[in-house]
C-alpha cells in the first residue's frame, strides 16, 4: 500500500494525528502485573516494559508473537570532513556483516525469534555535506521516509529499528542541537572513538552546519542534517505507530494456536512440524514426492537435527528450500533474513 504522504508537510500531519497510549489498557496491564505471583518489582524494568507495550498495543494482556527488526544503512557526505575514525566504505562492509548474520543484533534476533532485515539505502550516493548544502533536501527526505514506511511488515507486532552509517553521529548531534539548543559542545561525542583532535573537528563541523541552517525545526532539521537511514527510521516508526492497536481477532486466533509468547515455546521438531497441504501439493507439482524422509542426522554426532529443509525431500532427494519457520507456520519470513 502506498504511503499516505507525498510531502514533508503530509508526513508532519500524520505525526500530529497519531494517537497516544491506551489509558484503559495501561491500567489493566498494571493491575494484572500486581496480581502475578511474584514480589512487587521482582522483574525490574521488564514489568514497566510489559505495561508500556500493553498501553501502546491497546491490550491489558499483551502478546508478542511476531517481532520485526529493521536495520537501515546510509552514507553521509559530511564523513569526508574527517569526523569518524573509519572511512565511509565501512558502512557497506557492516551491511555485509549484518546480511551474513555476523553482528550482535543477528544473535539477539535469533535468540528471540525476531524477523530481521537490512535496508541499504543508496550507499553509493552519500548525502550532501551539510556544511555546504542541505544533507537530504525535501525530495530525498520524503523518499527515505517512504522506504522506512514500506519496510514495516503489517503482520509484525513489535518494531525494532537500528542504523548503520559512518558519520551519522555527527548528523545526529547536529539535529539534536538544532531541535533542543546547546550547540555542538552539548551534543557531540566521540562516536567511533575519535581522539581529541577528531572530537574538535566534529564540533567545528556541527557548529558550521548550525550556522548555515540556523533556525530549522522539526522535519526541516532532518532534511538539513540527517541521513537516509535516519529518515527511514522515522518513516518506519510512524508507520508502526499508526497500524496499532492490535486486531483483537488476530490476538484471539494466536492465543487459540498457543502462540502467546516467545517463538521458542512453540512446538518444534519432526513430530510438531507439518507443511500445509497447499505447500505439499505445490512441491509435488514441481517434481517432489511430498513424503517425509528420515530425520536428518549430523555427519559426526549422529544426533537428530529436528525439523528443517532436510526433513522433506523432492524426487532427487533434495531438501525443501525453505526454513523451519516457513514449514511449520506456513508463512513467509520465517527465520532471520
Image (cartoon, rainbow, N blue to C red):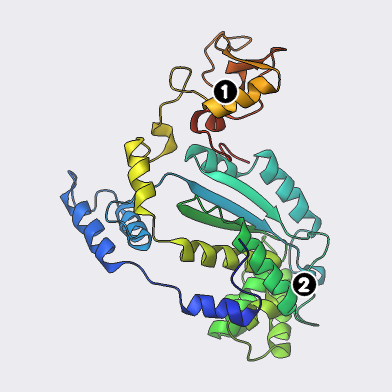
Q: Nearer the viewer, mark 2 or mark 1?
A: 1
Q: Position of residue 217 (x, y in %)?
A: 59, 86
- What residue would you read off at disc 2? 78
Mark 2 to mark 1 CA distance (whole Å) = 46 Å
* Label 2 secondary element: helix
- What residue would you read off at disc 1? 308
Q: Position of residue 230 (x, y in %)?
A: 64, 67
Judged left or right of residue 183, residue 16 is: left
Counting residues from the N terminus, which is met first, the one under dot 2 or under dot 1? 2
Tell me the quadrant of the picture where the C terminus can be found. Answer: top right
Classify mark 1: residues with Cα within 10 Å, few (<14), some (14-19) or many (20+): many
Residue 256 to residue 177: above or below: above
Classify mark 2: residues with Cα within 10 Å, few (<14), some (14-19) or many (20+): many
Label ID, residue 68: none
Tell me the quadrant of the picture where the N terminus can be found. Answer: bottom right
Judged left or right of residue 17, residue 176 is: right
Q: Nearer the viewer, residue 300 or 267?
A: 267
Amino acid at each position: 500500500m502506498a504511503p499516505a504522504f507525498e510531502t514533508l508537510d503530509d508526513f508532519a500531519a500524520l505525526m500530529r494525528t497519531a494517537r497516544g497510549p491506551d489509558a484503559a489498557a495501561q491500567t489493566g496491564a498494571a493491575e494484572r502485573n500486581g496480581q502475578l505471583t511474584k514480589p512487587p518489582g521482582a522483574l525490574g524494568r521488564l514489568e514497566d516494559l510489559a505495561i508500556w507495550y500493553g498501553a501502546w498495543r491497546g491490550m491489558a494482556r499483551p502478546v508478542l508473537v511476531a517481532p520485526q527488526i529493521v536495520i537501515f544503512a546510509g552514507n553521509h557526505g559530511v564523513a569526508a570532513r574527517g569526523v569518524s575514525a573509519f572511512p565511509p566504505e565501512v558502512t557497506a562492509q557492516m551491511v555485509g556483516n549484518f546480511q551474513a548474520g555476523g553482528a550482535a543484533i543477528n544473535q539477539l534476533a535469533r535468540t528471540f525469534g525476531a524477523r530481521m532485515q537490512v535496508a541499504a539505502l543508496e550507499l553509493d550516493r552519500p548525502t550532501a555535506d551539510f556544511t555546504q548544502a542541505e544533507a537530504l533536501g525535501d525530495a530525498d527526505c520524503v523518499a527515505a521516509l517512504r522506504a522506512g514506511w514500506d519496510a514495516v511488515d503489517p503482520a509484525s507486532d513489535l518494531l525494532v529499528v537500528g542504523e548503520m552509517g559512518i558519520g551519522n553521529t555527527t548528523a545526529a548531534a547536529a539535529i539534536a542541537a538544532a531541535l533542543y539548543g546547546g550547540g555542538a559542545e552539548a551534543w557531540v561525542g566521540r562516536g567511533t572513538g575519535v581522539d581529541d583532535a577528531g572530537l574538535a573537528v566534529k564540533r567545528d563541523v556541527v557548529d558550521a552546519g548550525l550556522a548555515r541552517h540556523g533556525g530549522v525545526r522539526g522535519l526541516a532539521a532532518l532534511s538539513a542534517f540527517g541521513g537516509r537511514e535516519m529518515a527511514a527510521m522515522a518513516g518506519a516508526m510512524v508507520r508502526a505507530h499508526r497500524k496499532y492497536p492490535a486486531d483483537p481477532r488476530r490476538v484471539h486466533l494466536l492465543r487459540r494456536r498457543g502462540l502467546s509468547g516467545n517463538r521458542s515455546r512453540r512446538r518444534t521438531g519432526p513430530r510438531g512440524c507439518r507443511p500445509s497441504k497447499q505447500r505439499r501439493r505445490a512441491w509435488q507439482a514441481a517434481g517432489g514426492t511430498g513424503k517425509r524422509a528420515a530425520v536428518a542426522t549430523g555427519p559426526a554426532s549422529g544426533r537428530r537435527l529436528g525439523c528443517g529443509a532436510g526433513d522433506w525431500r523432492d524426487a532427487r532427494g533434495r531438501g525443501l528450500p525453505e526454513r523451519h519457520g516457513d514449514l511449520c507456520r506456513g508463512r513467509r519470513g520465517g527465520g532471520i533474513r
